[in-house]
Image (tube, grey):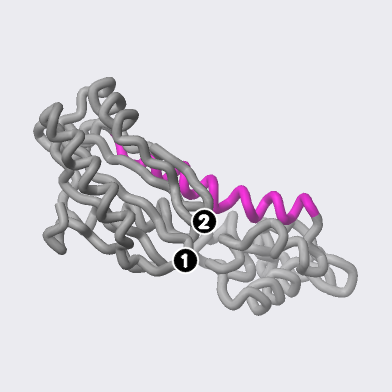
Amino acid sequence: MSICHWPREERPRERLLAEGTAALSDAELLAVLLGSGIRGQSAVELARRLVAEFGDLRRVLVARPAELSQVSGLGPARCARLLCVMELARRSLLQQLPQRTVLASPGDTKRYFRAWLRDRKQEVFAGLFLDNRHRVIRCEALSKGTIDGASIYPREIVSRCLEIGAAAVIFAHNHPSGIAEPSDADRRITRRLRDALALIDVRVLDHLVVGDGEVVSFAERGLV
């Protein structure tokens, strides 16, 4: 039976508007996003099949376009909607860290970068620039690379620190493999950045490596 023939109080969109997003299951939220079902399947049934095929909701939202397009019933429009959701969430996260905010703890920084960088298919190297009171000036991606790594140029990062007046910086990057253990290359670039920035009196407070849920801190390991 099509959702339009369900009792009004059982329809996901109507329930969402009446009761809020928390009232809906993962599949029902996906159904609202998909908009409609296909022949023989309601939007909720299609959403349940989608979650079952990928394993869970997170895997649906971080899937590649080629992976989504293999699912029967997901055309270009539905694939585009799903891809937009994760990117909108990431951009919203960036806007939640206003300038001059003081991060309360190293845990806050870890949670922030984990939410931003986890599940990305390419390596992204980011910098969180701070003033002399360790208040946030800006957070931005400094380099984007392939799944094998990103190109980091200390001279450009020194220039960026001078441009925005940073007194300290926290670096972070993700490992698309999901393994957060720092590589030898990670250690080398951290030393190069630390030494280059020391020449202009900018401190490297930490370098975080984001894996599949785990975040490794160079500072906690005594590597900066």
Residue 102 versus residue 158 in the image, above or below = below
At a point 47% along the width and 61% down the height, the residue shown is: 176
Q: CA distance from mark 2 to mark 1?
A: 8 Å
Q: Earlier in the sequence, mark 2 or mark 1?
A: 2
Q: Amino acid at mark 1?
A: Ser
Is there a contact, CB below 8 Å, between mark 2 and mark 1? yes
Residue 20 vs residue 67, the one in the foreground: 67
Residue extent of the magenta highlight: 76-98
Secondary structure at numbered mark 2 = loop
Name which residue lies at 53% across and 60% down. Answer: 21
Residue 140 lies left or right of residue 31; in this view the side is left
Q: Position of residue 194 (x, y in %)?
A: 18, 42
Position of residue 13 relative to residue 131, above or below, is below
Secondary structure of the residue carrying numbered label 1:
loop
Q: Which mark is residue 177?
A: 1
Q: Is residue 214 left or right of residue 29?
A: left
User: Which is more toward the observer, 101 or 126?
Assistant: 126
Please state which amino acid type lies under the numbered disc 2: Ile
Residue beneath the point at 64% across and 63% down: 30
What residue sits right under mark 2 in the picture?
147
Tell me residue 205's x, y (percent): 16, 46
Which quarter of the figure is the N terminus placed in? bottom right
Residue 129 is a magenta residue: no
